[in-house]
Image (cartoon, helix red, strand yellow):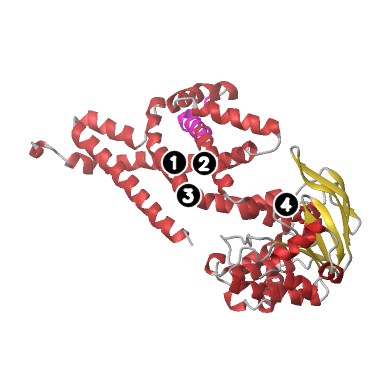
Amino acid sequence: MIEMKNVSKWYGSFCVLNDCSTRVEKGEVVVVCGPSGSGKSTLIKCVNGLEPFQEGTILFDDISVGEAKANLTKLRSRIGMVFQNFELFPHMSVIKNIMLGQEKVLGRSEEESDKRSMELLHRVGLSEHAHKYPGQLSGGQQQRVAIARGLAMDPDAMLFDEPTSALDPEMINEVLDVMVELAQEGMTMMVVTHEMGFARKVADRVIFMDEGRIEEDCTKDAFFGEPRGERAQSFLSKILQH
Amino acid sequence: MFDQFDYQVVIDSIPFLWEGMQLTFLLTFLAITGGLFLGVLLALARLSHIKVLSFVAGSYVNFFRSMPLILVIFWFYFLVPFILGRPVGGFYSVLVAFTLFEAAYYCEIMRAGIQSVRQGQLQAGQAIGLSYKQNMQYVVLPQAFRNMMPILLTQAVILFQDTSLVYVVGLHDFLVNAEIVATRENRLIEMFSTVAAVYFILCLSFSLSIRKLQRKFSV
């Protein structure tokens, strides 16, 4: 479903992504991890064209992301994205946040998108907050709304960019629970995260990145069993210590 | 000293002053609307990645911000009829002058407003598939307006006061009408203190309601 071939990206002379190749099959859950500044976020933002890249190709269902300038909005509407800082629209109520894309991009009627939004809010356990503003919700609740906003487009795949990094510890689980459920339903997911518990539970594959390079790309069991590279080993020992 | 004052003349001239005030209000309202609309377009052009667009918008802003308003008013008073080949009257020429002049200021305010919206918001809009125009319309500009509301309204108060400059092209606004009465009745002090009081009360109450509105808006 997602196929990256030799993707490279530079900020000036600094190489953020260095010859990255991988693929994500339909229904697969891939966790991307690695030290900060290793290019994980940049990598998944390239998938829906939020970040341009200079070399290589990314195919999403045979649509070339780098070239498909005209169809980028259509492509993005098929890929849900959840951000580290939620990025809900603060001037709209929760339900309007979820309805916006449905109405303006998919062309659904107000009734229809309202109905779908309520279903999704119910699913993430927030239906009683539909008419509040994002600022009135906790971080965990906001992130669940953000997931609902992504799902409202009925996407073929979901991208998560460190969805729990900005959350207080007691709120992490409520977001992870929603993501685990989503994964178990067969959603294609690419998740940048340091939550190794999540990776262990639902990931099919783990990608380890360092200095813009994909250092490891293997099944979950192989990764946690015995990661081959030295860097992946030292990374794991650091974050699994506690 | 105050017993020599005759405020009857003020009361008698209220209908005439109101006529002038209507012109002041109308001009302020139209110039704000037009200036804001043009200003937003200019701000988008100025922030555009298309170099020609941003250069043209930047030059426009720098040009008008380096000109005294009164010169711009004069200029359009003579220039617009020249271009159109027929007289357009004082009102339309000052309306054009005010709109174009204010647009330069509103452009800078809105540019700051757009830049005050986090990059992530733009990306969130893109991620759900909004086009550039939709993203601006539904996500970025509403937040930019909200963030810049106090400055936009302050600029509106300044414009309201600046409309008194229309006397140079012979339009009868509030101030001019007051002056006509003042010189005709030889009641300069009464009339001009009335004018001052009216401007003061209007601007102050407007500023106060801005602050109230501001508190209501901030979630």
Whether labels 1 and 4 share one chain: yes
What's the distance in space between the residues labelled 1 and 2, CA to CA?
A: 9 Å
- Give the amino acid at mark 1: Gln
Where are the magenta residues, as a range?
B87-100
Chain for numbered disc 3 = B
- Give the amino acid at mark 2: Ile
Confirm or deny contact between disc 1 and disc 2 (CB under 8 A): yes
Above or below B114: residue B166:
above
Expressed as whole percent of the image width and height from the top left, the position of residue B212 reads 38, 57
Q: Earlier in the sequence, mark 3 or mark 4?
A: 4
- Asked if residue B14 shows in the view, the reply is yes
- Asked if residue A106 shows in the view, the reply is no
What residue would you read off at disc 3? Answer: B149
Q: Which mark is residue B109?
A: 2
- Give the amino acid at mark 3: Met
- Give the amino acid at mark 4: Ser
Above or below A181: residue B67:
above
Whether labels 4 and 2 share one chain: yes
B155 sits left or right of B126 in the view: left
What's the distance in space between the residues labelled 2 and 3, CA to CA?
A: 10 Å
Expressed as whole percent of the image width and height from the top left, the position of residue B219 reads 49, 62
| Residue B163 belongs to magenta span | no
Q: Main secondary structure of the magenta part?
A: helix
Whether labels 3 and 4 share one chain: yes
Q: Quadrant of the C terminus of chain A?
A: bottom right
